[in-house]
Image: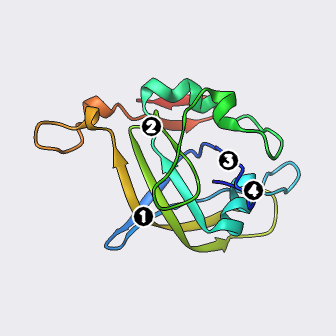
């Protein structure tokens, strides 16, 4: 995301999901912090700008992704902290992660607060307006090759699966 002043924010989420293909809809849910009930910068930025970019994570960038998960103060550029390259998006203000094999530029359709206590999620419903796919992860017929893309999934805590 970016904040209202255009400052970048990068924050990994354990998962997102596809809920529709026509129109293409992705969802994710930044939860309120359990320990102090604060909201994350991603949620505040999404509320302010109504735009996000969702970048998928593969094995090659999992360590850098983990570095971006540290709780930095507002205004700190997590792209720089994690060593990622900021790539200007075509249709939305938030930047893309150049190293990510697939990036989804999205406009936010709706944000649904699922509660107001620590741990409560905020369902962000996004419509994909543009998809970027690195050609290196495509097979000969132009489809994503699951072996080439080598996606990573979070299993919980510090455990990941590829």
Q: Residue furthest left?
A: 141
Calculate the distance from the C-alpha at mark 3 to the C-alpha at mark 4: 25 Å
Q: Which mark is residue 8?
A: 3
Q: Does label 2 or label 1 sit earlier along the sequence?
A: 2
Determine whether label 1 and label 4 are within 8 Å by CB. Answer: no
Q: Is residue 151 above or below residue 23?
A: above
Nearer to us in this view, 35 or 8: 8
Determine whether label 3 and label 4 are within 8 Å by CB. Answer: no
Q: Residues within 10 Å of mark 2 (few under 14, many from 20)?
A: many
Give the residue pinned by disc 1: 128
Q: Which mark is residue 100?
A: 2
Classify mark 4: helix, strand or loop.
Answer: loop
Calculate the distance from the C-alpha at mark 2 to the C-alpha at mark 4: 28 Å
Q: Is residue 151 above or below residue 105?
A: above
Q: Does label 3 or label 2 sit earlier along the sequence?
A: 3
Nearer to us in this view, 34 or 40: 40
Viewer-side label of 2, 4: 2
Viewer-side label of 1, 4: 1
Residue 145: image x %, image y %? 22, 37
Determine whether label 3 and label 2 are within 8 Å by CB. Answer: no
Viewer-side label of 3, 4: 3
Q: Quadrant of residue 77?
A: top right
Q: Which mark is residue 119?
A: 4
Nearer to us in this view, 11 or 14: 11
Q: Residue furthest right?
A: 36
Q: Is residue 141 left or right of residue 86?
A: left
Viewer-side label of 3, 2: 3
């Amino acid at each position: 995301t970016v904040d209202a002043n255009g400052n970048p924010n990068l924050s990994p989420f354990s998962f997102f999901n596809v809920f529709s293909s026509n129109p293409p809809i992705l969802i994710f849910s930044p939860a309120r912090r359990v320990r102090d009930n604060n909201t994350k910068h991603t949620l505040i930025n999404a509320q302010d700008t109504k735009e996000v970019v969702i970048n998928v994570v593969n094995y090659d960038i999992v360590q850098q992704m983990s570095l971006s998960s540290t709780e930095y103060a507002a205004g700190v550029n997590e792209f720089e902290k994690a060593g990622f390259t900021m790539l200007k998006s075509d249709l939305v203000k938030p930047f893309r992660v150049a190293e990510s094999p697939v990036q989804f530029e999205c406009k936010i359709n709706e944000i649904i607060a699922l509660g107001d206590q620590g741990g409560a999620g905020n369902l962000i419903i996004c419509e994909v307006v543009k998809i970027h796919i690195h050609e290196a992860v495509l097979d000969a017929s132009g489809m994503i090759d699951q072996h080439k893309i080598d996606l990573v999934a979070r299993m919980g805590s510090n455990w990941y699966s590829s």
